[in-house]
Image (cartoon, rainbow, N blue to C red):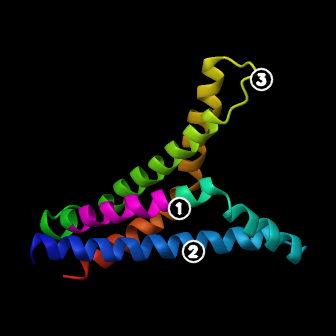
Amino acid sequence: MTIEQAKNVGQRETLKCTLYTYLGGELIFLVLMVGADFANGIIFFIDGHRNIHFLAMVTILFSVTYFAGQQNGKDILILGSHFFLTPFKYGLFTIWIVVAYASAVGLLKHDATNAISTFEKIRIYILVPYMRNTLVLLIPLLIYAYYCGDRIRNSR
């Protein structure tokens, strides 16, 4: 298998796994938003997706996944890297890039009239989101990494 073939396989499988994971998360959030009031839940769910920053974060997610997928394929199929650790590493890196965008938006949209210290800003807009999102997304990331790496490894 050539490097280009490995990159294409990795890219295709990684994008598919990311799409399935994203859609699964969306389905979970839809069910949680709808709850008992279907009409209002759907309205709030759709309204949340019309936010320009949400659209930017989804675009960043799939853009970074596009390039990480190529690296997944090359690392697993050509370099012989571990099939689970490689997608886990690049998946975590992708999550952190998306959280960096969200943190930057939060810092830039911060109301200057509410005077808080620099340490509090760092804690509220950087440390807490990174820790919370890493912990919340750890289990889905583990499932994603195993499934994605296994599909890339078995596509030889």
- Tell me the residue at 32%/78% (across/down): 151
Contact, mark 3 vs mark 1 (Cβ under 8 Å): no
- Disc on res. 58: 1
Mark 3 or mark 1: name the one nearer the start of the chain.
1
Mark 1–mark 2 distance (CA, rounded to whole Å) = 11 Å
The vertical placement of 45 against 130, above or below, is below
For disc 3, the marked residue is 114
The vertical placement of 5 against 132, above or below, is below
Give the position of the N terminus as an image quadrant.
bottom left
| Label 2: which secondary element | helix
- Residue 100 spot, x, y in % from top left: 50, 42
For disc 2, the marked residue is 23
Q: Which residues are magenta?
A: 59-73
> Splitting the image into 4 quarters, where does residue 144 fall?
bottom left
- Tell me the residue at 44%/64% (across/down): 62
Mark 2 or mark 3: name the one nearer the start of the chain.
2
Mark 2–mark 3 distance (CA, rounded to whole Å) = 37 Å
The vertical placement of 110 against 150, above or below, is above
Report the side of 7 relative to 99 (left or right): left
Give the position of the C terminus as an image quadrant.
bottom left
- Residue 149 spot, x, y in % from top left: 32, 70
Report the side of 124 relative to 16 (left or right): right
**Front tag of 1 and 2:** 1
